Image: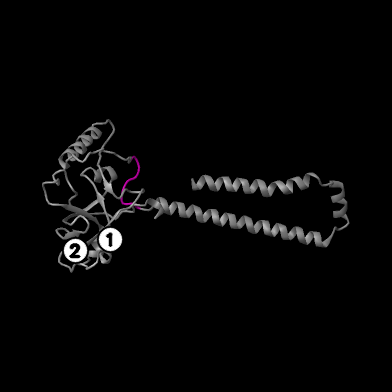
Amino acid sequence: RVLAFTIVVSVATGVVFGLAPALTTSRVDLNEVLKQSGRGGSAARHRTQRGLVALEIALALMLLVGAGLMGRTLQALWRVDLGFRPDHAITFILSLPATPLTTSAQTRARVRAFDTTIRGVPGIEAASVMLGSVPMLHDTSLPFWIEGTAKPSDINDMPQVMCYFVEAGFRQAMGLRLLRGRFVTDQDDEHSPIVVDVDDDFARQYFPNENPIGQRLNISGFDVQATVVGVVADTTPGGRDQ
């Protein structure tokens, strides 16, 4: 879209600034111009023309420099490592209507049935139901504190972390790179301890001199404790806009 807009603006600029001189030239009496040129013409008019030519060259150079800088910026943006693979990834909203009588077990069963159906579609390599943050769409943060450190007295004093509630297929679907430990699996269900993966930036910030694997995070709001089981490569969830 940026490239298309730039092309349109460039063409429109050329047409607008080229049309006025062309119309003026079409109304010029060439014989009169040649006579004036033969007599030496007006010195002031020649100075004006030279000034306009110099201004035109300066504007052309500015456009060339701007186009070159824009090209370098686009090239640099395409080299940004997002930490995930957005190509061939599709996201959509899933609604599971429920009633006050719907149990957690029924909801889980419906989600698992949906997983089975989606993964059976030809061409689907991996799938994951997800809540919280969605890459390139929106962010969700949760307050937390690390087990073994003093719990902040106020939730506003707790650090915030961007969170993704995902299934095992999320790593393959988004092309995440696992650096250490393991990713969540299908065995990490409602009957097993809660586990999380963190990215390398989180690990460097909160566990700079120790192994993050096995560390426990207290997630405020859900009032649960989660164990770190893996570290994935840093991600840029907002895409190349960030």
Residue 78 seen by the camera: yes
For this orientation, the residue located farthest to the left is 191
Image point (87%, 47%), residue name: 31
Q: Nearer the viewer, residue 136 or 77?
A: 136
Mark 2, Cα crowd under 10 Å, few <14 / some 14-19 / many 20+, is some
Q: Is residue 82 magenta?
A: yes
Q: Amino acid at mark 1?
A: Gln
Lower position in the chain sequence, tag 1 or tag 2: 2
Q: Nearer the viewer, residue 181 or 1?
A: 1
Q: Nearer the viewer, residue 95 or 124?
A: 95
Q: Is residue 103 magenta?
A: no
Element marked by disc 2 = strand
Q: Nearer the viewer, residue 84 or 108?
A: 108
Q: Amino acid at mark 2?
A: Ile
For this orientation, the residue located farthest to the front is 100
- What are the residue bounds of the magenta stretch? 81-88
Q: CA distance from mark 1 to mark 2?
A: 12 Å
Residue linked to disc 2:
146
* Residue 205 appears left or right of 82: left
> Residue 91: x percent and y percent?
32, 41
Image point (26%, 31%), residue name: 121
Residue 180 seen by the camera: no
Residue linked to disc 1:
160
